[in-house]
């Protein structure tokens, strides 16, 4: 069989991409079944679940929880655990959990059932094509100095939403950080072609002689 022709077939690359989307996001302990919950799980991006979302956010994800001030029914971590059990890909709750873990300098904040990486793993398994989850996860990994893992998640986000200017901009910054100027320039061009407002990536590429108008 001609393996070169096989790998050039578009269906092969679609299958490869699906495998990347659905594989575990890190090598570690299994993070539990996502559907093992008494309420949910529901998709945060599903507009038909507004009532369920309102119930969860009223009782477990109010402003005090989101601002890391205090829990509503238990600890901040406990309320985030409930929120992310009901809505595994709840964007704001994932971002809040990341901030809590970084603030408290722990991989598993008090009151949570899993580590932060596990909550992202569960979100990805629940909704693998949710690009926003990938971006939030990438930002968390970057703040933990896990550059390669952050890059991988942002690459997947761009594959899901190829024309998203913000994601292309951030991916360009990561490639620039790794001194991969060719890919940094490619994603910068995609971002600025859609009038992305921040000039930082363009200026940094210009500083190393890679950006030309």
Image (cartoon, grey):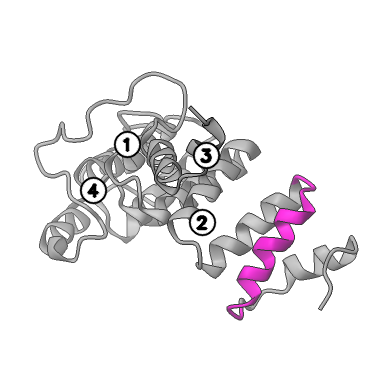
Q: Earlier in the sequence, mark 3 or mark 4?
A: 3
Q: Which region shows up in magenta?
A: 178-195
Q: In x, y percent, where is residue 166?
A: 55, 66
- Label 2: how many residues lie within 10 Å, few (<14), some (14-19) or many (20+)? many
Residue position marked by numbered label 3 in the rendering: 5
Q: Earlier in the sequence, mark 1 or mark 3?
A: 3
In this rendering, which labeled residue sits more in front, label 1 or label 2? 2
Residue position marked by numbered label 4 in the rendering: 87
Q: Would residue 145 be seen by someone viewing this image from the given angle? A: no
Please say whether residue 179 is one of the residues in the magenta stretch: yes
Residue position marked by numbered label 1 in the rendering: 122
- Label 1 vs label 3: CA separation? 36 Å
Residue position marked by numbered label 2 in the rendering: 158
Check the image and name the residue furthest to the top: 29
Q: Quadrant of the C terminus?
A: bottom right
Please say whether residue 20 is one of the residues in the magenta stretch: no
Q: Earlier in the sequence, mark 3 or mark 2?
A: 3
Examine the image and state in which quarter residue 212 appears.
Answer: bottom right
| Contact between labelled residues 2 and 1, with CB atoms less than 8 Å apart | no
Residue at 27 percent of width and 54 percent of height: 61
Q: Nearer the viewer, residue 201 or 66?
A: 201
- Label 3 vs label 2: CA separation? 26 Å
In this rendering, which labeled residue sits more in front, label 3 or label 2? 3
Q: Earlier in the sequence, mark 2 or mark 4?
A: 4
Q: In x, y percent, where is residue 159?
A: 48, 54
- Label 3 vs label 4: CA separation? 42 Å
Q: Earlier in the sequence, mark 1 or mark 2?
A: 1
- Label 2 vs label 4: CA separation? 23 Å
């Amino acid at each position: 069989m001609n393996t070169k022709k096989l790998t050039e077939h578009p269906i092969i690359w679609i299958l490869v991409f699906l495998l990347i989307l659905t594989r575990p996001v890190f090598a570690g302990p299994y993070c539990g079944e996502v559907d093992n919950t008494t309420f949910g799980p529901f998709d945060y991006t599903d507009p038909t679940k507004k009532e369920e979302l309102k119930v969860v956010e009223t009782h477990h994800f109010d402003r005090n929880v989101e601002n890391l001030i205090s829990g509503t029914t238990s600890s901040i971590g406990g309320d985030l655990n409930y929120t992310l059990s009901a809505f595994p890909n709840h964007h704001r709750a994932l971002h809040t959990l990341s901030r809590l873990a970084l603030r408290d300098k722990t991989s598993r904040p008090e009151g949570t059932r899993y580590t932060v990486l596990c909550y992202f793993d569960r979100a990805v398994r629940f909704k693998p094509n949710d690009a926003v989850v990938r971006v939030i996860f990438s930002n968390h990994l970057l703040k933990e100095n896990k550059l390669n893992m952050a890059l991988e998640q942002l690459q997947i986000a761009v594959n899901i939403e190829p024309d998203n200017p913000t994601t292309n901009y951030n991916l360009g910054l990561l490639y620039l950080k790794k001194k991969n100027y060719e890919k940094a320039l490619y994603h910068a061009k995609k971002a600025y072609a859609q009038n992305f407002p921040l000039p930082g990536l363009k200026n940094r590429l210009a500083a190393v002689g890679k950006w030309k108008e």
